[in-house]
Amino acid sequence: MEEKTIKQMQQEVDDYIGQFKEGYFSPLAMVARLTEELGELAREVNHYYGEKPKKNTEKEKTVEEELGDLQFVLICLANSLNINLQEAHERVMYKFNTRDKDRWTKKEKE
């Protein structure tokens, strides 16, 4: 599978949503969907790494699948608000590399 840039992923989602008359949901509805998807991710993590195993009747899903669902909705929200996720990523990394650069104990360089 070919690797995609964030820009390509945002365009792919926009092309997909653009084929429907309804378009993007409202930002509030998408935040609700993000919360829903995050809950599903939490449930899967709890099943695989926590103390709550799945019931025999529950559908088998994966953490990867739930992360993908969460990423899709996050991209939808960003697109609907005309937010470039690459730029948002650059801003947050700058913040972590400046303001928070001494917050954590760094590993020794070999």
Image: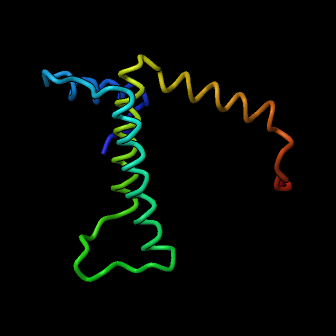
Q: Residue 21 or 93: which is nearer the viewer? A: 21
* Residue 34: image location, x then y, percent: 40, 42
Q: Is residue 29 above or below residue 86?
A: below
Left or right, 107 with respect to 95, comes to right
Q: Furthest-top residue in view? A: 82
Left or right, 9 with respect to 96, comes to left
Quadrant into which the N terminus falls: top left
Left or right, 11 with respect to 89, comes to left
Q: What residue appears at the point 51 percent right and 75 percent down from the top-left corner?
A: 50
Q: Quadrant of residue 43?
A: bottom left
Quadrant into which the C terminus falls: bottom right
* Residue 107: image location, x then y, percent: 82, 55
Q: What residue appears at the point 80 percent right and 38 percent down from the top-left corner?
A: 100
Q: In this figure, which colouring scheme has been used for the structure? A: rainbow
How many numbered discs, if any?
0
Q: Is residue 86 above or below residue 107?
A: above
Q: Residue 28 or 50: which is nearer the viewer? A: 28
Q: What residue appears at the point 42 percent right and 56 percent down from the top-left corner?
A: 39
* Residue 81: image location, x then y, percent: 41, 19
* Residue 49: image location, x then y, percent: 50, 73
Q: Is residue 23 above or below residue 46?
A: above
Left or right, 76 with respect to 49, comes to left
Q: Residue 96 or 3: which is nearer the viewer? A: 96
Q: Is residue 42 above or below residue 85?
A: below
Q: What residue appears at the point 51 percent right and 25 percent down from the top-left corner?
A: 86
